[in-house]
Image (cartoon, grey):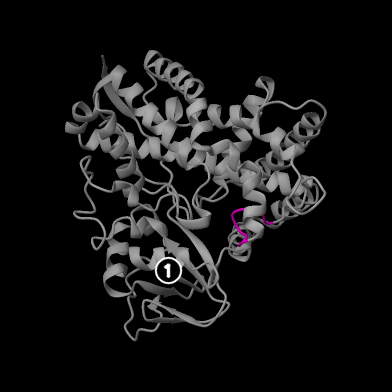
């Protein structure tokens, strides 16, 4: 049972982190926004923030609401570990001893340490750099769109949404062609660690082994780039020195940054491709309306990000006794900023549950966060999505769900909102 912090009322019918609610959260989000916008979940000892204005307030007050929430992520990993059989736990512990320890870097640090690391890679995501990348990104998208349509794969996620961002982030990182098949498998497994779908014991062990082997690959590439630099992200991380410190990144620091880009660089874009395609299936009138209008494509992308935020929420650590929206919070407590709820707040967005390709200020959505922790890869993600949907619509018409397959639904996760499968039908243009 969960109750509102600072409230006497109990909303016991809102199991916010129950599996069915994680799959279909929006009714619960609305109930919380209206009745308890700061909501204590005793099972996780966390306060969930669902109203747009309060989420924005907390994001901006980085001194009071710290990004040093490693403890929450470790607790989530511990829950999955403790659910495994004893023999599997022993094997996982053995594999874990081979892992390089990963220190906090960008995502879970505050200023000034956060910028110290972020500044090393921010040059890859400037407006001019993203524009420079456009021909390469467009070529990959056109090639993958042709392949998807020609192969006739009914699963859009497998046929297009997964491979496109993986290829692009692999290029940016500098993963050699011969290592791509392994890298794709390992990167997908890394992102899957944030989901709650139960795994067979052998799959848990396989993914742990992949994690070790992925570290070994990346360390090998870091060392190689120090000898022979190339134009990629690994080269930058391998050869840059931290501000005010006369040293290169440790392997752990470099791996920490690279791990964040593995998830942010492909998982969130993959998810948005999937949810956007599902919106086109469920709103067929939009297909023709946006097909040849780049402005409407951009708004459609922002609406997809708003309606189905690929990162539903991230925690913050309360550093001092305070209040948020009138609700008292104690130092040491955790809050969860629920972007997926804020993005459907009718106080901020008119008719918030509908896709509106003419919505003004659609970019006010919080799918990429805001402030100092605004997603550094957001410009690349938007570029991929704004090029990807026109490429698909140029080749496909009458896109619809395959009625012979189960209704698509999200994979449960505390953090991400992923669509694992999307079987569609269409007519080739």
Q: Can residue 414 be seen in this view?
A: no
Instruction: Depth check: give the residue in front, 94 or 63.
Output: 63
Q: Which residue is drawn at 54% across and 28% down?
A: 168
Q: State the SS at label 1.
A: strand
Q: How many marks?
A: 1
Q: Which residue lies furthest to the bottom in this view?
A: 8
Q: Quadrant of the C terminus?
A: top left
What residue is drawn where x is 56% and y is 32%? Answer: 169
Q: For mark 1, does the 10 Å Cα neighbourhood hold few (<14), some (14 to 19), or many (20 or more) residues?
A: many
- Left or right: 194 with respect to 237? left
Q: Where is residue 25 in the image (x, y as percent from the top left)?
A: 34, 57
Task: Please state the extent of the stretch shown in magenta in the rendering.
Answer: 104-111
Residue at (25% x, 25% y) in the render: 291
* Pick the front one: 246 or 15: 246
Is residue 107 a member of the stretch shown in magenta?
Answer: yes
Q: In which image quadrant can residue 339 be found?
A: bottom left
Judge whether residue 177 is colored magenta: no
Residue 312 in the figure: left or right of residue 208: left
The quadrant of the picture occupied by the N terminus is bottom left
Residue 31 visible? The answer is yes
User: In the rendered view, does 155 fall on the left or right side of 77?
Assistant: left
Q: Name the residue under label 1.
A: 48
Q: Relative to 15, say whether 406 is above or below.
A: above
| Nearer to the camera, 174 or 153 | 174
Looking at the picture, how far across and down is residue 258, in whole percent? 65, 42
Name the spot of residue 16 as percent of width and height, x first: 39, 65
Q: Is residue 402 above or below residue 139?
A: below
Q: Magenta residues: mostly which secondary structure? A: loop
Vertical placement of residue 153 versus 233, above or below: above
């Amino acid at each position: 049972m969960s109750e509102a912090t600072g409230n006497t009322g109990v909303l016991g019918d809102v199991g916010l982190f129950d599996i069915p609610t994680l799959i279909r959260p929006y009714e619960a989000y609305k109930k919380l926004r209206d009745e308890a916008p700061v909501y204590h979940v005793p099972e996780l000892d966390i306060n969930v923030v669902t109203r747009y204005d309060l989420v924005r307030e907390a994001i901006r007050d980085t001194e009071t609401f710290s990004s040093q929430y490693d403890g929450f992520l470790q607790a989530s990993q511990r829950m999955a570990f403790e659910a495994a059989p004893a023999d599997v736990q022993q094997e996982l512990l053995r594999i874990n001893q081979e892992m390089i320890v990963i220190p906090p870097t960008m995502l879970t640090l505050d200023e000034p340490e956060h910028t110290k690391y972020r500044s090393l890679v921010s040059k890859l995501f400037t407006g001019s750099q993203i524009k420079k990348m456009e021909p390469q990104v467009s070529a990959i998208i056109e090639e993958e769109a042709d392949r998807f349509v020609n192969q006739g794969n009914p699963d859009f996620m497998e046929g297009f949404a997964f491979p496109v961002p993986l290829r692009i982030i692999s290029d940016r990182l500098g993963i050699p062609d011969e290592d791509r098949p392994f890298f794709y498998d390992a990167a997908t497994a890394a992102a899957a660690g944030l989901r709650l779908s139960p795994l067979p014991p052998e799959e848990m062990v396989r993914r742990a082994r992949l994690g070790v082997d992925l570290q070994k690959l990346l360390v090998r590439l870091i060392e190689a780039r120090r000898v022979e630099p190339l134009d990629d992200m690994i080269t930058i991380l391998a050869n840059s020195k931290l501000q005010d410190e006369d040293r290169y990144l440790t392997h752990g620091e470099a791996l920490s940054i690279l791990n964040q880009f593995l998830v942010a660089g492909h998982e969130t874009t993959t998810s948005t491709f999937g949810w956007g395609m599902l919106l086109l299936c469920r709103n067929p009138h939009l297909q023709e309306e946006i097909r040849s209008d780049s402005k409407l494509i951009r708004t459609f992308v922002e609406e997809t990000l708003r309606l189905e935020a690929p990162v539903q929420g991230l925690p913050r650590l309360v550093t001092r006794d305070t209040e948020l929206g009138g609700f008292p919070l104690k130092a040491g407590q955790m809050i969860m900023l629920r972007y997926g709820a804020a993005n459907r707040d009718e106080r901020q967005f008119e008719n918030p549950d509908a896709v509106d390709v003419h919505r003004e200020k659609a970019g006010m959505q919080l799918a990429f966060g805001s402030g100092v922790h605004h997603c550094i890869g957001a410009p690349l993600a938007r570029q991929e999505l704004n090029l990807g949907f026109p490429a698909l619509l140029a080749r496909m018409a009458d896109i619809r769900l395959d009625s012979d397959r189960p209704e698509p639904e999200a994979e449960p996760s505390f953090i991400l909102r992923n669509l694992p499968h999307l079987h569609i039908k269409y007519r080739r243009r």
